[in-house]
Amino acid sequence: MRYTRIIVAVALVGSLAGCLQNDAERGVAGAAAGAVIADATGNSAVTGAIIGAGAGVFCDDAGICN
């Protein structure tokens, strides 16, 4: 069941990745994905959301998002 949640979360966030235009949108999507994945793996959802939000906001600065 845990892996199903992770796969669904990654698929949903991946499908939205092309639609995100600014840092705020990417940050919200990253926070949601981080929380879901952390919760599914038995970790802190809050910590996952913080890490995911940071990754979403700074992915374009790192050259990962275009």
Image (cartoon, helix red, strand yellow):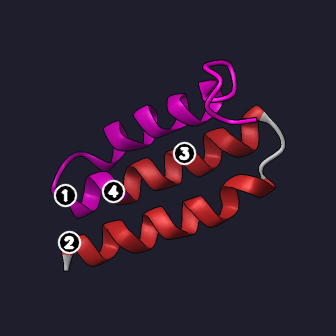
Which residue appears at 59% of the width and 36% of the height? 56
Asked whether the residues under the numbered discs 3 and 1 touch, taking CB atoms below 8 Å apart as contact, a structural biologist would say no
Label 2–label 1 contact, CB within 8 A: yes
> What kind of residue is marked 4?
Ile
Give, as a three-letter code, the residue at label 3: Gly
Q: What residue is rendered at 61% in x and 29% in y?
A: 59
Q: Tag 4: Cα neighbours inside 10 Å, few (<14), some, or many (≥20)?
A: many
Magenta span main SS: helix
User: Which mark sits nearer the N-terminus, 2 or 1?
Assistant: 2
Whether pointer 2 and pointer 3 mark residues with C-beta atoms closer than 8 Å, the reply is no
> Which quadrant of the figure has residue 8?
bottom left
The dot on residue 2 is 2
Magenta run includes residue 41:
yes
Query: Would you identify the image quadrant in which residue 57 lies?
Result: top right
- The residue singled out by tag 1 in the image is 41
Mark 2 surroundings within 10 Å by alpha-carbon count, few (fewer than 14), some (14 through 19), many (20 or more): few
Tell which residue pokes out farthest to the top in this image: 61
Q: Is residue 4 above or below residue 24?
A: below
* Three-letter code for the amino acid on which mark 1 is drawn: Thr
Mark 1 touching mark 4, by CB under 8 A?
Answer: yes
Going by the picture, which residue comes out furthest to the right? 21
Q: Residue at x 28, y 51 (%)?
A: 38
* Element under disc 1: loop
The quarter in which the C terminus is drawn is: top right
